[in-house]
Image (spheres, helix red, strand yellow):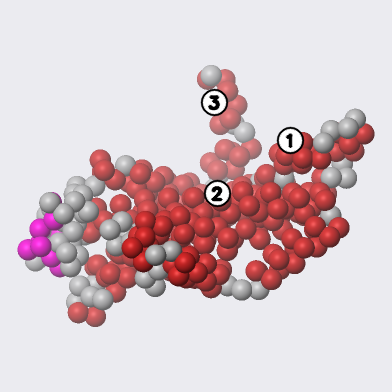
Amino acid sequence: MRATLKRWWDGDLCWSWRHTPVAIVASVVLLLMLVGAFGAQWVAPHNPFDLASVELLDALLPPAWDSNGQGKYLLGTDSQGRDLYSAILYGTRVSLLIGLASVALSMLIGVVLGLISGYAGGRIDALIMRVADVQLSFPAILIALLIDGVARAVVPRDMHEMIAFPVLVGAIALAGWPQYARTVRGSTLVEKNREYVQAARVIGVPSLVIMFRHVLPNVTGPVLVLATVHLATAIITEATLSFLGVGVPPTAPSLGTLIRIGNDFLFSGEWWITIFPGAALVLLVLSVNLVGDWLRDALNPRLN
């Protein structure tokens, strides 16, 4: 076990990480935010969504270092008396869960379609790529808004909060699959002409087995890098939709919802309600982007 860990620590990827200060700082910040988000029930000093513990008399309190603030509310409170620091931790978890789920679904759709397109070729390839080209001509946020609006129009109003999470994940995922499909298709076009694929065809291995057992492992490198970068985009898209009021319900707000709520009080002097969730969103997206940039450079053989 120790030898395996030492070999992993001395590998090219870890060596690159240890010699990239920006990647180290971004990784530490991202790790702290992940621990705070997914361990919010233990890290957060209050449960901002427990109505029994919320005190309306403590509404709109400034941060603790302000003369009018209270020590038990580090970053102040919102209009309902909820601890803003605790709300940010819980909101970060919602944003991360939606981002991770939408990236996983988008990657699944894009990888499968990209494999089929690149390996089959012909009319199937042309059809899938033309659909991807048409979708790429529209902004991702517009596609997500369209899908979300159609879903809300079809489903009864009393079920909107129930379907908010899956609809949001599906909308972001369907807006991002063409990038994975195009990337996997390009790699598949190269891999399907390699000797090991030709040998598998000669001995009668089915095409589906060749695609998913032999070709897929050799095209996952660019996909993982793209997924890391796409995670930041998915979080931004979710925050934008929530800010516009078509995202997650107020009972389980994300960072975008917290920013939207605080925006109503920005010009009345309660700046902390929107500034701190906005800073958390910027820090989260920036750290994910920096880690993704490092991973892209580390896995690029031309730069090594």
94, above or below 1, in the image: below
Where's residue 185, x and y in %?
76, 54
Q: Residues within 10 Å of mark 3 (few under 14, many from 20)?
A: few
Residues under labels 3 and 2: Cα distance?
A: 28 Å
Q: Amino acid at mark 2?
A: Ala
30, above or below 147, in the image: above
> Is there CB contact under 8 Å for labels 2 and 1?
no
Which is more N-terminal, label 1 or label 2?
A: 2
Where's residue 218, x and y in %?
74, 41
Give residue 104's mark: 2
128 vs 200, left or right, is: left
Give residue 5's mark: 3
> What span is colored magenta in the figure?
53-65
> Is there CB contact under 8 Å for labels 3 and 2?
no
Which is more N-terminal, label 2 or label 3?
A: 3
Residue at mark 1:
213
Where's residue 192, x and y in %?
84, 45
Q: Amino acid at mark 3?
A: Leu
Outermost residue on the bottom side: it is 267
